[in-house]
Amino acid sequence: MKVNKNSKNQQLEQFREEGKDQYMTTDQGVRVNHTDDSLKAGSRGPLLMEDFHFREKMTHFDHESIPERVVHARGSGAHGYFQPYNDTLKEFTKAKFLTDPNTQTPVFVRFSTVVGSRGSADTVRDVRGFATKFYTEEGNYDLVGNNMPPFFIQDANKFADLVHAIKPDPDNEMPQASAAHDTFWDFASLMPETMHMIMWVLSDRAIPRSFRMMDGFGVHTFRLINEEGKARFVKFHWRSKLGAHSLVWDEAQKLAGKDPDWLRRDLWEAIDMGDHPEFELNVQIVEEEDEFKFDFDLLDATKIIPEELVPLRPVGKMVLNRNPDNFFAETEQVAFHPGNLVPGIDVTNDPLLQGRLFSYVDTQLNRFNSANFAEVPINRPLASTHNHQGAGFMRHTINKGKANYWPNSIGGGCPMMAPEKMGGYVHHMEKVDGHKIRARSESFNDHYSQATLFWNSMTEPEKKHIVKAAHFELGKVMSKEIRQRMLGHFNIISPDLAQRVSEGIGVEVPKDFKPTSTGHYEDNEASKQMKKGKSVKETDFVSMEKHKIETVASRQIAILLEDGYDYCEVMQVKKALEDAGAHTKVVSKFHGMRKAATGEEIETDKSHITTASIMYDAIYIPDGEETIKALLKEGDAIHFVNEAFKHCKAIATSGNGIALLEKAEVLGIDFAAHDSQKVLSDKGVVTAGNDADAEEFATKFIDAIKKHRHWNREEKMMVPA
Ligand code: HDE
């Protein structure tokens, strides 16, 4: 069958229902005449059992929830499509959806946090899930990844322990959606293999600005198989076209209260407005004969392949262009599984991946209470399905005929087996030989080198954020013993890191720390070969700062004003921002119309009580004697500026607006000094005199927004906003 980017939408159409211009009916299709009262024996009497409408309505409601996912419970979904740039991957894989530039394969993506429950806040410090279902012509392929490339553990047998430790405590169910408690850090400090991932989780990657502004990673090493049956190792990467950007921790915590749906809303609104998120799929390919070329094991999911060793190869682009119609039917019911593979892609012996191959179907059985979850519209493949799996709860398909077994002659031997050349999936013929042993390869036994690599590859502001995150996380740990154990690990990763963390958590770096290891590692041929492997001391690509994409596209800019602003300037700056792809929102004390000095009016989009600076990427305060006078009297406005400054966001103001900066004490600098403009602009604060050229002013502002955050402000002591 041939699919195009609309195929999934068309398939879903047959299941959609809107009720427009229709009478309300029961589930049996009987028209309802009255739904406000139940059937009673007298208007003051008891309810009657025969009220089929009431019973059906209530029963349905009573059964409306299904178990939330045990991890990744909170998520947001979007539809879109994937299209390869060209056919160059043909050399490596026979998967058509990766190699035919003329095929736009429909996808459904679900982004998620991991730890929190379904109603938890979006902006917590956590890993983000990035799961993609490709509805390919050859069946569904799921790339179930995260926004960080390593993982905490090496063996699936430790997953339940990891999740128990990080989830709320079993006795009091606290804290919600947070690793900052004793059990998680107890576990981590006893598990050296978590150290590389711990560095990522302490970094800004764990507080993304938007689901649209984070990268995705397949994490494990998978296999690509070409037409000739030749296999190669592969790692999958999604690169956000908007770049990977983060919130700051103070902002993330405040957003969790002011708008717990922050990331969900951002994704929904962006798609709604036509800012369709785009991600580029990249692969790192390793020849089988190079398996032991590195100083880590490719099967160890706690490791990355530094891009200096194996560069990324762009494959194609994914565009998310449609919001779901129904959260439950689509985002909640979508069921991913890393074992949903199509010809041309296969798994490896990574012991974490192998365990996942069991867990995902098992967990769907808990969620759906039936093996028929693949028939739910969002999970249905576009490729037609034919087999003898014909019964069970909620079976939709009506399989015809008598022959529900294979082989059969009664059914004409159908459905038939597909030879490989007809698209039959053939597992890669890897030779496997070994003793039954509950152990890992010694080649998995280096838990620190890549944690050090990560630390060494960070810019100074990023290092600072990691240290602060550790102060927060470990500062919440009651046990000094656990804090100290973590310092022991940090000291192995980098004495500088350990020292800086130690200063904030009231314990000394231990002198004679010996990490405990709970894994059982066995030396073997692979580990002997691997030790000669290649390594690097720094890898640029893990730093978000070194690879930021300088664009203002889809950024939200607040225009802070009251009556009496300079209308001309506002319109020019607004136009320049919007032409560059940003969005503007007028923020004032109250909703309503705001009058310019010259009499024109603009409507307020948000009032101070409904918004906050944390919901914008940058702020602009237009000139105007009266507007600034009014803003100077508003605590909320001064706080707005002060907070945006503290969060290192671009700020622009002209003429009288400079007085507001002074009042907000943004820099504590001498505004009268001849170089004050330069001092300000170096820190992302764009100012101009009364008669400034608005176009030039807007261009400078846009350049400052492109930098996203002006971390050099952090050097200065700042009063918390
Ligand atoms: Fe998952 N994981 N996971 N995971 N995972 C689930 O499946 C599991 C792991 C990831 O939006 C569950 O349907 C085990 C790595 C995402 O619906 C469950 C192990 C990576 C999602 C499960 C891992 C992931 C899940 C819970 C270690 C990145 C959300 C609900 C062996 C490569 C998918 C569900 C969605 C969800 C098990 C580790 C990504 C329980 C046993 C590594 C994005 O099956």
Image (tube, grey):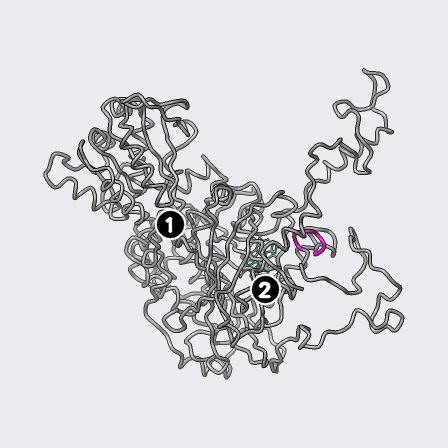
Which residue is label 1 attached to?
A: 469
**Residue under the image location 27 percent in, 30 percent down:** 568
Q: Is mark 1 within 8 Å of ligand 1?
A: no
What is the three-letter code of the residue carrying label 2?
Asn
Q: Nearer the viewer, residue 239 or 166?
A: 239
Q: Which mark is residue 157?
A: 2
Relative to 24, is 292 above or below? below
For the point 41% across and 47% down, which residue is it?
Answer: 209
- Residue 196 is one of the magenta-drawn residues: no
Local SS, label 2:
helix
Which quadrant would residue 462 be assigned to in this image? bottom left
Type of amino acid at the residue the image marks with label 1: Ala
Residue at the extreme left of the image, as rendered: 674
Horizontal side of residue 447 vs 168, given as left or right:
left
Q: Position of residue 548 (x, y in %)?
A: 34, 55
Q: Which residues are magenta?
A: 374-379
Q: Is residue 209 left or right of residue 713?
A: right
Q: Main secondary structure of the magenta part?
A: loop
Front residue of 120/703: it is: 703
Q: CA distance from mark 1 to mark 2?
A: 28 Å
Q: Secondary structure at mark 1?
A: helix
Q: Disc 1 or 2, which lies upstream in sequence?
A: 2
Q: Quadrant of the C terminus?
A: top left
